[in-house]
Amino acid sequence: MINSPPTAQERPARAAPLRALVVDDEPLIRWSVAETLAALHMAVDQAADGAGALDLVSRTPQAFDIVVLDLRLPDVSDLSLLRQIRQQLPLAFVVLMTAFGTAEIKAEALDLGAQAVLDKPFALEELGRLFSATGIA
């Protein structure tokens, strides 16, 4: 499921690489997604839980352009973190990953501003195709 990304006019132009944040409590998944984004020439930060993600968002001087976020984390297992991320990063391209994606959760995530919802497990190539198809990377 995909929502329309922010338009080029809405995102500020920059010469620096896109900044991405990967949030997942499973180290191997977090690392794999981060490596995939780095291969797309993005500067990537990682967080293992919602508190760590919000801390990075609040203290990082340059806003994240992309957030890849797991639905279920040790400290949050609903869409409240997605809601907070959208409030703090209204222009970010947000991808929600979940192994528990009911039709209702996916619809609500898109309504809250996620641009895409990926069902776990997914092939890492899907991220590259997603960003290419939307003109992000």
Image: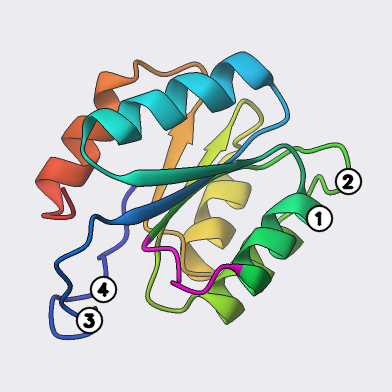
Residue placed under numbered mark 4 in the picture: 6
Q: How many marks?
A: 4
Q: Which element is circle 2 on?
A: loop
Task: In the rendered structure, find residue 12 and report the number of the disc placed on it.
Answer: 3
Instruction: Indicate the amino acid at tag 1.
Output: Ala
Q: Quadrant of residue 86?
A: bottom right
Mark 2 or mark 3, which is nearer the start of the sequence?
Answer: 3
Q: Is residue 91 above or below residue 136?
A: below
Q: Residue furthest bottom?
A: 9
Q: Nearer the viewer, residue 113 or 68?
A: 68
> Does the magenta-highlighted stretch encompass residue 62?
yes
Alpha-carbon span between mark 4 and mark 2:
29 Å
Instruction: Indicate the amino acid at tag 4.
Output: Pro
Tell me the residue at 72%/37% (across/down): 48
Mark 3–mark 4 contact, CB under 8 Å?
no
Q: Quadrant of residue 129?
A: top left
Q: Nearer the viewer, mark 1 or mark 2?
A: 1
Mark 2 or mark 1, which is nearer the start of the sequence?
Answer: 1
Residue placed under numbered mark 2 in the picture: 75
Task: In the rendered structure, find residue 51 and report the number of the disc placed on it.
Answer: 1
Alpha-carbon span between mark 1 and mark 3:
27 Å
The local crowd at label 3, few if under 14, some if 14 to 19, many if 20 or more residues have their Cα within 10 Å, is: few
Tell me the residue at 62%/25% (across/down): 99
Mark 4 or mark 1, which is nearer the start of the sequence?
Answer: 4
